[in-house]
Image (cartoon, rainbow, N blue to C red):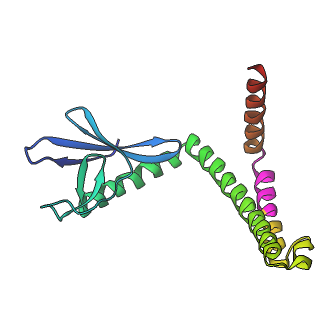
Amino acid sequence: MNTVTKTTKDGRPVVITGHIEHGVAWARATLDGTEIGDGYPGKTAPIDGHPEMTHRLGRLALTTAEFDAVKALLVATQAEYDATVEGAHVKLIKDREWLVNLVDAATGTAIDTKADAFDAGRLAEYFQTAHGDVETAIAQARARLAVFDRKHPEILAELKAEIDRQVNDSMRR
């Protein structure tokens, strides 16, 4: 397991490890066996008397160099996970989710365009089925999703099985 170690002012080691949650690499910092930070380190407001501390991971303040080391740890942790069978499978699910979101965004743009036309009183434009560019974007997004589904039918079957399970569970309540 990859780790980054930081030493506190009083000489105790803070161990930062990478782990995977829901297919994404996160950092966990522990001091004397107690978790003091979990997640992705973020920028912090200036800390009085410590301008070199630019990031935080929970209660743990990090310098830019320490943040870069943690970021490299997370990249390595993610790469190791992505190389596993489970990681590759989760990546396929996320790729499909991205394509579904692309279809949703293109469709939402069409709805927004129609609403804008209606609000502006351009009723002829509103009653048209769709606008060329928007209709093309929707068709392209749907085509990309269809190609993915043909290439990876097991992902679609898994998602449909999960929906069926959820429906059956809700009907039993």
Observer-nearest residue: 110 or 94?
A: 110
Q: Quadrant of the N terminus?
A: top left
Residue 166 in percent (x, y) is at 73, 30
- Left or right, 28 with respect to 125, comes to left
Residue, x 79% and y 69% (percent of image)?
A: 115
Snapshot quadrant of residue 32: top left
Place of residue 154 in the rendered image (x, y in percent of width and height, measured from the top left)? 75, 42
Q: Is residue 48 left or right of residue 38?
A: left
Across and down, in percent, residue 108 comes to 75, 63
Rendered residue at 75%/61% (across/down): 103
Q: Look at the image and tell me in which quarter the C terminus lies.
A: top right
Q: How many marks?
A: 0
150 is within the stretch colored magenta: yes
At horizontal 83% and vertical 67% (from top left) the residue drawn is 139
Q: Is residue 101 left or right of residue 38?
A: right
In the image, which residues are magenta? Answer: 142-153
